[in-house]
Image: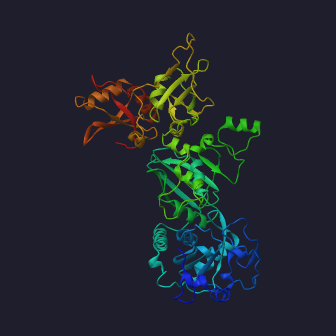
Amino acid sequence: MKRPFSENPHATPSSLANLPDEEMHQIQRGSDELLAQTGAVSNGSVMSPAPNHADNNNDAKKVKLDTKNPGAPSRVIHIRNIPNEVTEAEIVHLGIPFGKVTNVLVLKGKNQAFLEMSDEVSATTMVNYFTNCTAQLRGRAVYVQFSNHKELKTDQTHSNAQNPSAQAALQAAQALVNQTDTQGGPNTVLRVIVEHMIYPVTLDVLYQIFSRVGKVLKIVTFTKNNTFQALIQYPDVVTAQAAKMTLDGQNIYNACCTLRIEYSKLSNLNVKYNNDKSRDYTNPNLPTGDPALDSALAIGGAPGVLASPFAAMHGLSSPLTAAYGASPAGGMPFTGMPLAGVTPTAAALGAAGIRLPGQPSPNCVLLVSNLNEEMVTPDALFTLFGVYGDVQRVKILFNKKDNALVQMSEPHQTQLAISHLDKMKTWGKQIRVTLSKHQTVQLPKEGQPDAGLTKDYSNSPLHRFKKPGSKNYQNIYPPSATLHLSNIPPTVDEEQIKDAFAHAGANVKAFKFFPKDRKMALIQLGSVEEAIAALIKMHNFQLSDSSHLRVSFSKSTI
């Protein structure tokens, strides 16, 4: 909706539109009323008009302003060259990092907006900042300067009380400012916690999301208290604050992987390695931390910043990142409302376990190396990797039995397995889990010797995630010393279960039935490595004639 801006409190959009040019000029006096269409003027500087914008007027004359007096400080800020589709919320978003926003007015037909701050100090800080750093809205440069007006006036008919979008934007801004006041001072480093992480979240996914707000300098990821977390550093406080206000509380994937963002106590990140856990984008020559990879890269002369192991599957990025690419804004809506009108890509559907007809299947095969060849079997790998996805086939390499190929049913399941099992100590050795160059695991031809090293599990009844949207996705956790047991028949007691685990070689430290559901229990073992071995042996263990035990890793302790 167009709304007037005038010293005349009774002006209306129609009356403004019908004014002769001379009278219009008298109302819209001063440097800030010169339209962006006649020239892109940034804080008194003369620049060429933006090219190829149909919404610009044909009058593309350059405008000369008195550069010695670009405008006296005012708490009202004039923003020019805004795209037609810009909302009040996006205009308010520009001002939030600098102080309290008290009013907003968007003149969409004129490609202009006005923002009123609570005081001149906040407004001056904002104008000074955008003098040295170009502001952007929906990928388009906009120009920020002081208005000649000392306050923002609108008539009663077109006041913000009658404009729900403006009112909502101002209320949201005030809520965010209040929230910031209670959470400590802004910082260039953000601490990001990913809650309810059903699907894996990688460093590259975070970079893709957070770099939409501004330039990301460094990222460090880690797991603490069984929760995936990250530290993300921006070049300045304003960008970090904008990222926090824009992305806090957003879901990366539908109804899960929620971002909780707060300011870190750190003011700078010290990144030692460029790999899938940490990255310094200002220093591409850092080592990876893996001597074998570093020496190979040195020989090959490859860049220091490694592509993620999942780089080939960027299409599996979240609806959040997909929305960035698909929305006209090229970014998140500030209000946190659902992204309407965004068509999910085939890859985004694939991440949700939906495959379109004729859609090529991305790589679902993992290479597992440094296995204990005395202990490893296809069934053991099927059970372990089956915690993170439905294993279709397993092949232990005939000439190198400490290596195996594991084929999952969906690409995001390979990511889950990599993020949770890579470098995990299993049977006394730290296994490595990476993507394989193979697209599928080949079954041996008839008559070809295989010694039982290759098995097909495509029709196994033990798949945990066969049903679309299976609840099992909500209970995926990294390996831990505590195991979650389910499908326990009422005839089996605590001692029988503990004895069964002891016979499997486990050192049972604690056991507890669920108070409200005796079909489930927690059992705590001596170490994570013990728990991995116990899960491999005890999952599908027959407890009675009709009941087989179900075992998974737990986020809880006893």
Q: Which corner quadrant of the image does residue 554 belong to?
A: top left
Q: How is the image coloured?
A: rainbow
Q: Is residue 150 above or below residue 477?
A: below
Residue situated in front as seen by the camera: 55 or 259: 55
Residue 80 image point, x, y percent? 65, 74
Q: Which corner quadrant of the image does residue 539 belong to?
A: top left
Q: Residue furthest left?
A: 491
Residue 133 image point, x, y percent? 68, 69
- Left or right: residue 37 versus residue 166 is right
Q: Which corner quadrant of the image does residue 232 belong to?
A: bottom right
Residue situated in front as seen by the camera: 30 or 394: 30
Q: Residue drawn at (40%, 41%), measured in percent from left and top?
A: 475
Q: Is residue 518 above or below residue 332?
A: above
Residue 452 image point, x, y percent? 51, 16
Q: Residue furthest top?
A: 447
* Quadrant for the C terminus in the image: top left
Residue 506 image point, x, y percent? 39, 29
Q: Residue drawn at (56%, 16%), measured in percent from left and top?
A: 444
Residue situated in front as seen by the camera: 36 or 288: 36
Q: Would you say residue 511 is visible in this rendering?
A: no
Q: Would you say residue 341 is visible in this rendering?
A: yes
Q: Residue drawn at (61%, 59%), measured in percent from left and top?
A: 268
- Left or right: residue 500 versus residue 121 is left
Total tally of numbered discs in the picture: 0
